Amino acid sequence: MADSKLVRGTMVLTASIFISKILGLIYIFPFKAIVGLEGLALYTYGYVPYTVLLSVATLGIPLAVSKFVSKYNSLGDYETGRRLFKSGLIVMSITGLVSFLLLFLLAEPIANQVVDGKDLKGNSIEDVILTIRMVSVALLIVPIMSLIRGYFQGYQSMGPTAVSQVIEQIVRIIFILCLTFIIVHMMNGSVGLAVAFATFGAFVGALGGLTVLLIYWFKRKDNINKQIQESKVNHQLPLRTMYKELVSYALPLSFVGLAIPLYQLIDLMTFNNALMGVGYDQATAEEAFGAFAQAAHKLILIPVSIATAMSLTLLPTITKSFIDNDQSLLQKQVTQTYQIILFLTLPAAVGLSILAYPAYGTLFGLEDVHIGAVVLRYYAPVSVLFSLFAVTSAILQGINQQRFAVIGLLAGLLVKLILNIYLIGNFEAIGAIYATGLGYVTSLGVNIWAIGKHANYRYYFILKRSLLIVLFTAIMAFVVIALKESLTIWLPLDNRVYSFIVLLVTVLSGGVVYLYVSVRTNLAGQILGSRFKFLKKKARG
């Protein structure tokens, strides 16, 4: 039963997060065409502090509520989860309001740190201030929406989260693209104004997502109330006791959820200044930052979306296995999760790195491909580390060893903070990627050690499987490189159409080769057979 819940929940959330990421990737192409790399940099100036403050506003409580509700529901006590949910709505409303005011007031100090305002070719301080203040409004409702999602996930119901995420993204994207196009091309407005209104799309999209959740709530309210009335157990915990337990889950969750935003915050505060320190002007530094923090980052998050979905669904199911002391199921879930993440993200990351030039040229255009493609080539492999960190942190939370996830994150951030300016000074934009990679390797080292120790997990089997996945990825990489080099003799990558043809042929060929060797050796069937039955049947045939 628990395994089928994991499978169903994983499939639903994987689909929704993947769709959301694809939509989030697709819209960035026309958006970048409208506002350019400097506009993408300005957009990031608003979104990074917003994301950090959003995590502070929620303090990891939505996902902690999922864990809390799942725990007490499994004990037959539905009333305790409902009481926590009601009080949580009040808490989220207050923290959202405080965070909104904080970000609104901090907009000017942040702007002064990020740009110097003296270079007329770059973004102005006024544009950065307006952008940050426009996105801050979303903090008033997003924490509430996140809490409702967490409550539904506590019932192992992933549908409301999945649908609301997709609707939120669609509404946000339509608002962003329509408004920026109108401002820049129809009203001849500035890029700074267009980007500021684009960040306001976070608020508009959240309204769409919240509407979907409320519809689900009113449809399911009677059934949830019936379960509460039929509860056989009521622990009658006082709110203080409930929140003490919740905070023990929530604080580590909030830190882990802050991982990517905190790394981006370090880059936000140091990247431009470090590049200007080695001779870049502000405009060129901002173009590099836009390519690194938005364009390339969006692309590499596609493989990471699988890991994100897995980590969201892992928490309630691993928690249940841990509470039930079902070691066999717990070991199986951990093993299967590691395998799926490596099987899917490693070839995707390697392929994206190899095809960085045609990928960036096709999707973002050729005018700044020499900046973007180089950044993407080095950044793509880091997506594997992002994925593994998300999953290992979720496992640690599920076995009540959250403190190691926090220790790992803090250690990694310290490495990033110490090395970032030095590495950017020596390797320019690529230095920021090196610092991020080294930080995540540090964090992963702590997480993997802690899982081995506290879940009694042995890595021998995973190491063997990893070698097989690496071998098949290497075979795929050889085919992709050979095809790319052959095709570019006749189709030089100085043409967007040629870049698209090269990208399409190499991606399809690489995917077919990787799937073929995986199915023929039964690796795909053993790893994904429970989710895609045809793989097992084909492998046996």
Image (cartoon, grey):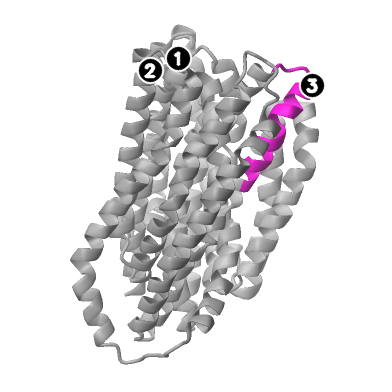
The residue under label 3 is which amino acid type? Val
Query: Which residue is at a point 21% across and 68% down the rendered structure image?
Result: 220
Query: Which residue is at a point 31% across and 39% down the rendered structure image?
Result: 170
Residue count near mark 2 (Cα–Cα under 10 Å), binned few <14, some 14–19, many ≥20: some
Disc 2 vs disc 3: Cβ atoms closer than 8 Å? no
Residue that label 3 marks = 278
Among numbered discs 2 and 1, the one appearing first in the sequence? 1
Percent of width and height locating residue 346: 52, 43
Front-lying residue, 88 or 484: 88
Disc 2 vs disc 1: Cβ atoms closer than 8 Å? yes
Q: Please, what is the dominant secondary structure of the magenta stretch?
A: helix
Residue count near mark 1 (Cα–Cα under 10 Å), binned few <14, some 14–19, many ≥20: some
Percent of width and height locating residue 164: 31, 51
Among numbered discs 2 and 3, the one appearing first in the sequence? 3
The residue under label 2 is which amino acid type? Ile
Among numbered discs 1 and 3, the one appearing first in the sequence? 3
Query: Which residue is at a point 21% across and 65% down the rendered structure image?
Result: 218
**Tally of numbered tags:** 3
Percent of width and height locating residue 509: 39, 29
Discs 1/3, front: 3
Q: Secondary structure at mark 1?
A: helix
Residue that label 2 marks = 501
Front-lying residue, 469 or 240: 240
The quarter of the picture where residue 235 lies is bottom left
Distance between the Cα atoms at labels 2 and 3? 38 Å
Q: Secondary structure at mark 3?
A: loop
